[in-house]
Image: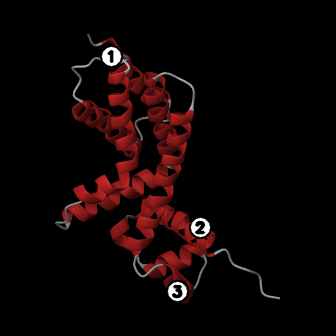
Amino acid sequence: MAKKVDHDQRKQEIARKALRLFSQVGYDNVSLIMIAAATGVSRTILYRYFCSKREVMDAAILEVTGLIEKRSTKVLMARSNTAQKLEGICHAVVEEMFAHREFVIAVFDFVVGMVRSGADMNAAIKEYTTGTREAIKRLIAHGQRRGEFPANLKVERISDAIYAEFESCAMRIVLNTEKNTSQAKQRFSDVIHAITAWR
């Protein structure tokens, strides 16, 4: 009797293994033939799941951003004040970024390559990060309503500043200037403390 294949699981495995390849040799240098070889499947099977390497990259991005959103949802359900929840989400994102260093490197290379070729990646980046961005905005607005954050804060600007810190964290991972999460987490904690203390 033939072994039953979990197609979603296989698709995720292909995307995960392809990420390692993207991070090692660069998105532009990878072909579907190379992905098939690196993931141990035939080209015929690979084409059942993906029509292009862009689809492989999109699947990998969605998997990791999905993990981040699941962790963020757990933080939001916790019994804690708004600042603690905001800090918890930021720390969760940092932990996932460091746990998936190859992902961060591959996505950075992918985005730079697409921009170099003339593509506008702004809309795509916003689409991938909408869940986390919206959670941060909602928390800041919620904190203002509860009097935990100053009423004169501009929600959009503060959420952009926090997101910019994520971008900085990604760059440090790519450059390998930070080896663990401790400094990145401390920067987020400092920013959130400054928000709550801003009167």
Residue at image location 56% in from the left, 39% down from the top: 74
Tell whether label 1 touches label 3 (CB within 8 Å).
no
Q: Earlier in the sequence, mark 3 or mark 1?
A: 3
Query: Crowdedness of circle 3 by 10 Å Cα count: few (<14), some, many (20+)?
Result: some
Query: Crowdedness of circle 2 by 10 Å Cα count: few (<14), some, many (20+)?
Result: some
Question: Of helix, strand and loop, which one carries label 1?
Answer: helix
Question: Of helix, strand and loop, which one carries label 2?
Answer: helix
Q: Earlier in the sequence, mark 2 or mark 3?
A: 2
Q: CA distance from mark 3 to mark 1?
A: 53 Å
Tell whether label 3 touches label 2 (CB within 8 Å).
no
Lateral position of residue 139 relative to residue 96, left or right: left
The picture places residue 68, in percent across and down from the top left corner, at 49, 46
* Foreground residue among 72 and 61: 72
Question: Of helix, strand and loop, which one carries label 3?
Answer: helix
Q: Nearer the viewer, mark 3 or mark 1?
A: 1
The residue that disc 2 covers is 13
Question: What numbered label is drawn on residue 194?
Answer: 1
Amino acid type of the residue that numbered disc 1 sits on in the rendered structure: Ala
Quadrant of the drawing holding the C terminus: top left
- Splitting the image into 4 quarters, where does residue 118 fall? bottom left
Q: Earlier in the sequence, mark 1 or mark 2?
A: 2
Q: Nearer the viewer, mark 1 or mark 2?
A: 1
* Foreground residue among 15 and 151: 151
The picture places residue 90, in percent across and down from the top left corner, at 44, 34
The picture places residue 96, in percent across and down from the top left corner, at 51, 44
The picture places residue 66, in percent across and down from the top left corner, at 49, 54
- Splitting the image into 4 quarters, where does residue 135 fall? top left
Residue at image location 41% in from the left, 42% down from the top: 173
* Foreground residue among 144 and 161: 144
Tell whether label 2 touches label 1 (CB within 8 Å).
no
